[in-house]
Image (cartoon, coloured by chain):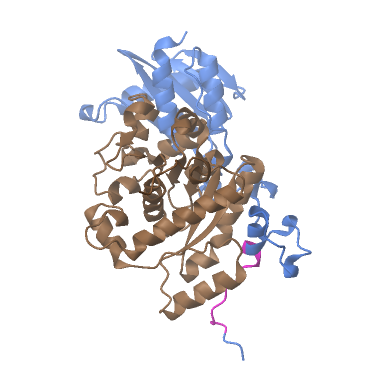
Chain colours: A brown, B blue
Amino acid sequence: MAHIISIVSSNGGAGKTTVALNLAVALTEGQEPALLIDLDPLGAIGFSLARGATKWPGLAEYLMDLAAIDDVLMPTKLGHLTLLPRGRLDPLDVGLYEQFIHGDGILQQILGAVEDRYRYIVIDTPSGLGQITRAALAASTHTLLPLQAEPLALRTISQTLRVIQHVRDQENPGLQLLGILANMVQLKQDVSFTIMNTVWSTLSGVLETYMPRSDIFAQASEKGLPVAFLSGKYSAEAIRFESLATEIKSIIHNLGGVAGEFNDRPQRALV
Amino acid sequence: MTDPNAPSYDLDQAQLLLHSLISGIPKPSAMACQEQGELLFTRLQRLTAPSITSLAGPSARTHQNIDQIPMEVPELFTSWEDCMAWSMEITGSASTFVVDSQGFIIASQGDLPERGIECIGAELVCSVETLERIDADYGKLAWIDLDFENRRIAGFVAPTGEEYFIVGLLSPKPHYHQLRTLLERQIMASLPGMD
């Protein structure tokens, strides 16, 4: 059974898509199969990979019975990583898309059909706490909450936590919060430093790994790549995502889940 | 004197929620006596809402919470009865009806006006023909939405070849606007198999 991780936040610009994409890549680098689902009706993953809104068929085509789910699962050059794009959704139909995703158990159907093929399924959700985010949480085993190191994000974090709690209590008792991922941290800036100081001293469940604000994310976005795929020296940010993947695997393991590296590690020869 | 604009982050509630969400976290002593029931969020369904007719105006009525509406998309309808029941439920209409292109009511359901709806059906059909004369280039009329002082009548004009049916809604709640595409698609997909 796959570990299904929804990346959720009430705030736009919290870095959900960047986290989802780079985390999925980092999880896959361990040779464990992963699926990245772009549940955002605006198709943020596709845009992050520098593809146009009508480039890839995906969920929209599946929802409209225009394609089978296997036809819209898109292999990547990473081998173990598969994408499930949003599809060529007409932006005028975003409301209807939200109703389909939320109202018909469709996400559970999709996940049920594919989850035995993957160790990890990472779901990128839209900003806000609307129907799609709720549906993603209801269908997930875990959730990760990116927190932009800015005042507004910190002041609104209770809203996201409240929704996670509600979904866990009412719809999905198996849902587990992996933790809060501090994102876009700038410790040399007073405000960001104060935020992080408050977060670390006040809140439980803050991951040890945090992501700095860095130009490299914009460079990667411009080229339509995960940070680990940029040419040149392997970036500190890519290493941070490796650390994040390791920390998440460890948390899942400690929560009682099975993370591949702990029990599927093949014997290797050194010389 | 305390600066009222000093950085202030009231995270008690966040920490309380985190405590309930993450197992193995020691309970913060400051919150030891707080129970989940003390969360400060207000659930809308706990409010005693005034009746829809007593609300002041359209702006107040538009706050219908669409998230509370049963939104399951059913299998394709095989009868007008099923179609009307679902349409009435999701739009919160007082009643629904189906009128054919000759102006005859062929089915109705719900809390119908005492004087019946035959006249409404016939007038709707006349209205469709009148309105389509506004400009032939605009194509066929798809929806009628008549917002009277005391009630609203809305109708989806479902074409079947040269003829059509109007699926009418009496007093639908304002959120029905957001459901029009869903209604259209479901009805059009079902039409070939309807009795």
Q: In this view, does A138 lie above or below B18?
A: above
**Majority secondary structure in the magenta region:** loop
At x 29% / y 67%, what residue is drawn?
A: A215
Q: Is residue B195 above or below residue A34?
A: above
The reply to whether residue A204 is visible in this rendering is yes
B126 or A132: nearer the viewer: A132
Q: Is residue A111 above or below residue B37?
A: above
Determine which quarter of the picture holds residue A38: top left
**In magenta segment, residue B41:** no
Residue projecting furthest to the right: B33
Determine which quarter of the picture holds residue A231: bottom left
A165 or A144: nearer the viewer: A144
The reply to whether residue B64 is visible in this rendering is no
**In magenta segment, residue B10:** yes
Describe residue A154's horizontal placement relative to residue B37 as left or right: left
B135 or A189: nearer the viewer: A189
Looking at the image, how many numbered discs can be counted on the residues? 0
Image coords of residue B148 (percent x, y): 49, 37
B150 or B71: nearer the viewer: B71
At x 42% / y 64%, what residue is drawn?
A: A211
Determine which quarter of the picture holds residue A80: top left
At x 31% / y 38%, what residue is drawn?
A: A90
Describe residue B77's horizontal placement relative to residue B15 as left or right: left
Q: Give the range drawn in magenta.
A: B4-14
Image coords of residue A232 (percent x, y): 22, 61
At x 41% / y 52%, what residue is drawn?
A: A23
Describe residue B166's horizontal placement relative to residue B136 as left or right: right
Describe residue A216's horizontal placement relative to residue B101 as left or right: left
